[in-house]
Image (spheres, rainbow, N blue to C red):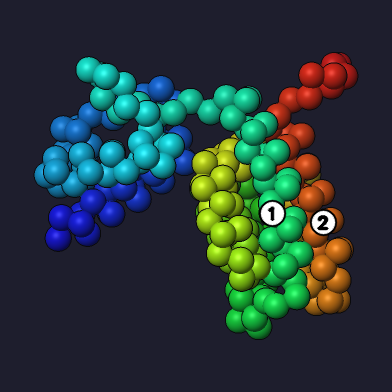
């Protein structure tokens, strides 16, 4: 039961970090979290330790666990890795993805497209899109059937700014992202690994432009 409680607390805290309930540099106190979630301090302590090891929190001596601040350097490093690894994963996946996985991707793409058209009227749409987007990328990566590559990307994508926040996306940006998802699926259907790979690269470059300001970007 302790392990089950720890997993539940871990997932709740992580989701609260993702949706902004816990802000960057905010301290999470064992007693407060335990009270909020109606659990003992033991699973909270274990969950906080796990979240520190995963990079969501940082342990500050004599102070406790603090939500890690996401910097421009962090975002740049993550995108540099994703731009190398994720297009490769999609290229591999496109040649061997199962029908059930492909159907799941189609379903996720459809759900995200519907939610995209609701972002101006439904405050929860962006959080839901972020969750579905993470699942879309996760399924594609696993479909590469390369466990080492999948493990590397899981560690990178897990803390990616894309998963944390879609707040930088206006409606046009979101629609473009949805078109990229559809085009990746079209490329897989057409049996073109190169096409799928290049669309994923463009997809990540577009996201990078929104989250990592270029030093030479024109102003005004």
Q: Name the residue under label 1.
A: 86
Residue located 63% across and 52% down the image: 118
The residue under the point 48% across, 25% down is 69
Placement of 136 over or under 57, stated as above or below: below
Numbered circles on residues, count: 2
Q: Give the image location of residue 48, x and y in percent.
A: 28, 38
- At mark 2, the secondary structure is helix
Mark 2, residue position: 199
Which residue sits at x=67%, y=76%? Answer: 97
Query: Is residue 123 depicted above or below 143 in this figure?
Result: above
The dot on residue 197 is none
Question: Residue at 73% of width from left, 58% of height from top?
Answer: 88
Q: Position of residue 181 (x, y in %)?
A: 74, 60
- Residue 6 visible: yes
* Labels 1 and 2: the sequence-earlier one: 1
Image quarter of residue 167: top right
């Amino acid at each position: 039961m302790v392990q089950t409680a720890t997993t539940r607390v871990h997932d709740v805290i992580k989701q609260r970090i993702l949706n902004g309930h816990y802000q960057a540099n905010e301290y999470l106190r064992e007693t407060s979290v335990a009270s909020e979630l109606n659990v003992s301090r033991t699973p909270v302590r274990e969950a906080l330790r796990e979240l520190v090891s995963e990079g969501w929190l940082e342990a500050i001596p004599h102070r406790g666990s603090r939500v890690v601040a996401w910097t421009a350097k962090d975002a740049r490093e993550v995108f540099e890795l994703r731009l190398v690894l994720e297009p490769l994963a999609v290229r591999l996946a496109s040649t061997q993805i199962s029908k059930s996985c492909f159907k799941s991707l189609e379903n996720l793409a459809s759900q995200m497209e519907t939610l995209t058209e609701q972002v101006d009227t439904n405050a929860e749409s962006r959080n839901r899109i972020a969750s579905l987007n993470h699942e879309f990328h996760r399924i594609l990566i696993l479909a590469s059937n390369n466990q080492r590559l999948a493990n590397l990307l899981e560690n990178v994508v897990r803390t990616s700014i894309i998963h944390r926040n879609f707040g930088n996306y206006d409606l046009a940006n979101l629609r473009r992202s949805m078109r990229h998802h559809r085009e990746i699926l079209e490329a897989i259907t057409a049996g073109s690994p190169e096409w799928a790979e290049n669309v994923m690269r463009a997809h990540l470059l577009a996201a990078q432009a929104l989250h990592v300001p270029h030093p030479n970007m024109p102003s005004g």
